[in-house]
Image: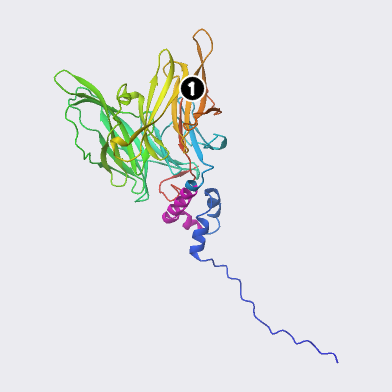
Amino acid sequence: MFQRKKARPHIPIPRRNNHIPEDIVFDALSRLPVKSLLRFSCVCKPWSSLIRSRSFISTHLNMSLCRVDNDHDHGYVMHMPRSCVETTQVCTVSCDRSFDWISEFRAPFTHYTYVVGSCNGLLCLYDYWKFDYKVHFWNPSIRKFKSLPTASIIQSNTLSLGFAYDSQNNDYKLVKVEWPIDRTLQPMPPPEFEVYSLSSHSWRKAEFGISWRPNILYYSINYNSPFPFVSGHLYFMVGTIRETGQQEMHTREMILSFDVNSEKIGELPVPDDDSFKEGSSYRKHLTLFKGKLALTKDHSFRPYGYGHSVWVMTDYGECKSWNKLFFVTIEGPNVDGYVRFNGFTKYGSLLIQQKLEPIDNGKYKIENKFILFDPKTLHHKDISIQFKYPSNLVSLYVATYLESLALHDAENVVSY
């Protein structure tokens, strides 16, 4: 006998729950690249508010830094030309090891600016060609920049700028150092420090809390290259001429440090090495080498050849920890400006710029050839970096690059 199947009992299907726990959303979004986050900001207002929040930006930065530290095969380097002719600067992102082109950003300024420094994908640019002393924070990843309020500047002084990230307070800071150019002031007073904070959008003075030698007749701070930022400190090389007796004078150097967290000033010893002490302070520079403070010195050998010495401080604050790492020799004519050392990549390769190429009869043509030198293997290779006005290229600013959301939560920013 045919039996009817029993009908299934009716089970109501619950409505689909679209709610995702906030902590899961936070964690998932914090792992995404900046370009994706900018798109997802349009999904809904809560996501937009989250991505703009200070805590999210900080978490996203920390996760990006961890990925960079763990990625030993790939890194990114950013370079910008320093040319007085180009009306618009282009920031180029390349592979750290090969300098192969990856992407580029056009700076949103109509005139030349000097790169003070870069930190976590945020660039600090200084416009001094029109003498209005404008400073801008620029994040090319999110196409935003912020112009800083003008600081008090004494026209009779010379100034230098340093840019750094205060990790304890999650703040970006600009440090302005001024010193007098009037050599009739004897003894010369110490430099004055002033600090701009992005979080407070204001300037404040920092106290010069170390002893200043009373017999300094003249000094200057080397500002030909950006000041290195190492372990929470900015470093400044000071070249001094100091009186030691009634008639005798001699030249020496000192290193000033600025703690961006406590905003205190300190002093570091220079290498106790005769090969470092001799020569002009102008040829000595502070830089960054594999996360450590380094000192470089240019040498010239007449009539032919250039050299470059590098010292690295292995233990912070210890004079004996300055180790002479290597010496690079570059063949070429002993012409001022023929060779420039642009800096180190994350992996320790040295970028060298050759500005002249010999042709015949002692004449030279402007070449702007770039060489990547590996201090471990002593091997070097030519790399291709193209510019619109190569004959007017003064130098090249080079720094490691990281996409970030810095400035995304800041006030009074300009989007373009």
In the image shown, does 20 or 204 lie closer to the viewer?
Answer: 20
Residue 46 visible in the current orientation: no
Q: Residue at x 43, y 52 (%)?
A: 58
47 falls in the magenta region: yes
Q: Residue 89, image x and y in percent? A: 49, 32
Residue 41 located within the stretch drawn in magenta: no
Question: Who's the residue at 49% across and 46% down the image?
Answer: 68
Which portion, as a residue range, is magenta?
Answer: 45-67
Of the pair 87 and 167, the residue shown nearer to us: 167
Q: Please indicate, yes or no, whether residue 245 appears anywhere in the rendered image.
A: yes
* Residue found at the very far top of the displayed protein: 361
Looking at the picture, tell me which residue is in the foreground, 334 or 326.
326
| Residue ranking furthest to the right | 1
Determine the residue positioned at 25% across, 41% down: 206
Q: Quadrant of the N terminus?
A: bottom right
Quadrant of the image occupied by residue 284: top left
Check disc 1 and report the residue beneath it.
354
**Residue pushed farthest bottom?**
1
Left or right position of 275 against 243: right
Specify the principal SS of the magenta part. helix
Q: Position of residue 351 (x, y in %)?
A: 48, 30
Residue 41 coordinates in the image, percent (x, y): 52, 54
Residue 63, compared with residue 290, is above or below; it is below
Q: Nearer the viewer, residue 48 or 320?
A: 320
Helix, strand or loop at label 1? It is strand
Residue 316 as seen in the image, left or right of residue 380:
left
Q: Is residue 252 above or below residue 125?
A: above
Amino acid carrying label 1: it is: Gln
